[in-house]
């Protein structure tokens, strides 16, 4: 399926809201109200949002009755002054216009990464971006941009802007990053959109306690889970009687039942001395949702494999960080997270180290943790290569395979370049690049130049794109034509991506690329409104805007479905805005994964 571009003015808000939490598949889709420009953030209020909560009249007035005559009038002067409202002290206030955790300058994004881009337009792009993305490196760069502590763009409510960033991070599988953004906004300033995203963040992080500060907003904008959230929070606050009463009332009169109610009851039982023993029956359950995942994980329950394996990659990335699960239980999800870009190569190594330390010495030789150790400290090159091959051969799923490459990337740098290793060279170079070791990979340039056949072509193409010193790799038009002539991929997709990457990185003349594209039908010169916009954002130096637009151009899980023109403009835009490393890694990844 071709990547889909969504370009234009900010679209209308989606229809589904928090009441559908118990029915939605992960990642769920909230229905934030359209952001409206505001000179300063204001606390969420029914008067300012279309999702106005209705309060029963009886809660505000009392009906006359026989007891009226017993009311004793008290002079206003005799009443003690009302207690002051609980407020954030001034020193604890966070600036809502600059929510984030990372220094944009340290990331190479500059002090104004969004430049003069329109906030409503960027919000629309982010809200409708399909995930996962084709590129692991684009994922990581976009995550960092969304976490950057930069001033919100023009024409955006700053609270809603933070919510859009957190929501995209959740859909990318970045639960911890999303929580950082949500935690950077004072809760009394939450808009309906931020309340909805805050609920999703709490569930993704398996943290029911994080729902409690959102109770006022949940009461106002959702009647479906309001009572269940109130019951869980009462239990966590040490009020078991109130929690039990609310659970019972929800069981009799609530709209949510089945396992969704039972899981909330499980949290109530775990949070206080309620005397409630709950058994979770997974047999009738046909899918995991945000609600089910978050509450089950918080209670230390592991869903059946049939549900976990059918869950989205993003949910698997959430599970990879759950502290209540053992390292062995988290490993399959961690590999998915590594393939997406949520987990780094070092995070995967640390996880395998934990498994290694916890395994009985007599059982180690049969484990992947042992193979990881041998890949690094095997007695000789053959032992290390054998371990690397076993790990890669065992990773069949594309995301798991890419994660395994990143896992053994450092070990691959310990293998000296050798033309005799032509069969191993493509995977070794792919592994080094997946872990970001571009200079170590470049050491293979001389050995690769003496290799032939498809393995030699694959290794050369990645180095031609990734090598920091392009002069060490032959990128002449003759060498490129040889590659194209040997390319057996469908519609010569690998040749198209190679030429697109080379011209985007400035390693091939535009005239040469146009000639090759025309002769072999590579489609590199195709233009759309998206190509115009990413070029314009790059010309204005809008580093983060370029990354968002790059994400919209890579909305597919398969690099073979990415048009060559998209890679060309992504690489060129990143190169022009000083993001050379990311541009080279994305271009090389395209050749590595096709």
Image (spheres, rainbow, N blue to C red):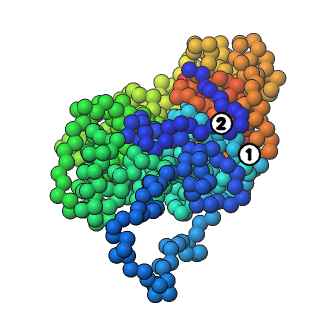
Q: Is residue 101 left or right of residue 336?
A: right
Q: Residues within 10 Å of mark 2 (few under 14, many from 20)?
A: some
Q: Is residue 488 visible?
A: yes
Q: Position of residue 368 (x, y in %)?
A: 31, 38
Q: Quadrant location of residue 447?
A: top right
Q: Quadrant location of residue 569?
A: top right
Q: Position of residue 414 (x, y in %)?
A: 47, 42
Q: Position of residue 24 (x, y in %)?
A: 42, 36
Give the residue at x 65% y 36%: 11
Against 477, residue 320 (above or below) is below
Q: Nearer the viewer, residue 402 or 60?
A: 60
Q: Which residue is mark 1?
A: 118
Of all residues shown, which one is farthest toward the right? Answer: 511
Give the residue at x 77% y 32%: 532
Against 476, residue 78 (above or below) is below
Give the residue at x 70% y 32%: 7
Q: Is residue 352 visible?
A: no
Ranked by sequence position, the earlier of labels 1 and 2 is 2
Q: Name the quadrant of the C terminus.
A: top right
Q: Nearer the viewer, residue 512 or 192?
A: 192
């Amino acid at each position: 399926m071709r990547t889909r571009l969504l370009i234009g003015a900010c679209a209308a808000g989606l229809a589904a809201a928090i009441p559908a939490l118990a029915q939605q598949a992960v990642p769920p889709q909230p229905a934030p109200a359209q952001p409206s420009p505001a000179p300063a953030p204001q606390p969420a209020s029914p008067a300012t949002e279309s999702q106005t909560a209705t309060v029963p009249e009886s809660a505000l007035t009392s009906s006359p009755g026989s007891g009226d005559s017993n009311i004793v009038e008290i002079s206003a002067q005799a009443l003690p002054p009302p207690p002051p409202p609980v407020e954030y002290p001034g020193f604890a206030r966070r600036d809502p216009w600059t929510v984030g955790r990372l220094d944009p300058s340290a990331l190479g994004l500059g002090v104004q990464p969004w430049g003069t881009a329109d906030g409503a337009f960027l919000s629309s792009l982010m809200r409708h971006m399909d995930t996962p993305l084709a590129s692991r490196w684009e994922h990581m760069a976009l995550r960092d941009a969304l976490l950057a502590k930069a001033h919100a763009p023009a024409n955006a409510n700053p609270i809603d802007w933070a919510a859009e960033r957190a929501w995209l991070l959740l859909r990318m599988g970045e639960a911890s990053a999303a929580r950082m953004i949500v935690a950077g906004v004072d809760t009394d300033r939450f808009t309906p959109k931020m309340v909805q995203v805050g609920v999703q963040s709490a569930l993704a992080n398996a943290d029911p306690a994080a729902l409690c500060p959102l109770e006022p907003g949940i009461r106002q904008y959702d009647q479906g889970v309001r009572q269940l959230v109130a019951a869980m929070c009462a239990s966590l606050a040490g009020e078991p009687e109130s929690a039990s009463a609310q659970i019972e009332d929800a069981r009799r009169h609530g709209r949510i039942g089945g396992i969704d109610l039972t899981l909330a009851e499980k949290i109530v039982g775990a949070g206080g001395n309620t005397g409630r023993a709950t058994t979770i029956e997974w047999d009738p359950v046909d899918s995991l949702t945000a609600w089910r995942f978050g509450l089950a994980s918080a209670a230390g329950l592991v869903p059946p494999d049939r549900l976990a394996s059918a869950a989205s990659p993003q949910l698997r990335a959430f599970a990879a960080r759950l502290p209540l699960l053992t390292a062995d239980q988290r490993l399959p999800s961690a590999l998915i997270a590594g393939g997406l870009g949520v987990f780094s190569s070092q995070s995967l190594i640390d996880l395998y180290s934990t498994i290694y330390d916890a395994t009985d010495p007599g059982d180690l030789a049969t484990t992947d943790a042992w193979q990881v150790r041998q890949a690094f400290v095997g007695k000789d090159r053959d032992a290390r290569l054998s371990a690397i091959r076993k790990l890669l051969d065992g990773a069949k799923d594309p995301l798991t395979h890419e994660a395994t490459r990143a896992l053994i990337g450092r070990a691959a740098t310990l293998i000296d370049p050798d033309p005799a290793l032509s069969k191993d060279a493509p995977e070794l170079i792919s592994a080094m690049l997946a872990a970001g070791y571009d200079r170590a990979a470049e050491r293979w340039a001389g050995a690769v130049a003496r290799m032939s056949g498809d393995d030699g072509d694959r290794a050369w193409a990645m180095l031609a794109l990734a090598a920091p010193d392009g002069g060490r790799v032959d990128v002449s038009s003759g060498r490129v034509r040889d590659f194209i002539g040997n390319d057996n991929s469908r519609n010569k997709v690998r040749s198209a991506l190679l030429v697109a990457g080379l011209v985007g990185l400035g390693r091939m003349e535009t005239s040469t690329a146009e000639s090759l594209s025309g002769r072999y039908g590579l489609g590199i010169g195709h233009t759309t409104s998206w190509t115009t916009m990413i070029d314009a954002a790059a010309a204005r130096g809008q580093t983060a805007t370029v990354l968002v637009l790059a994400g919209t151009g890579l909305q597919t899980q398969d690099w073979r479905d990415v048009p060559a023109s998209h890679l060309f403009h992504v690489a060129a835009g990143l190169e022009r805005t000083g993001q050379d490393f990311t541009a080279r890694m994305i271009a090389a990844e395209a050749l590595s994964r096709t």
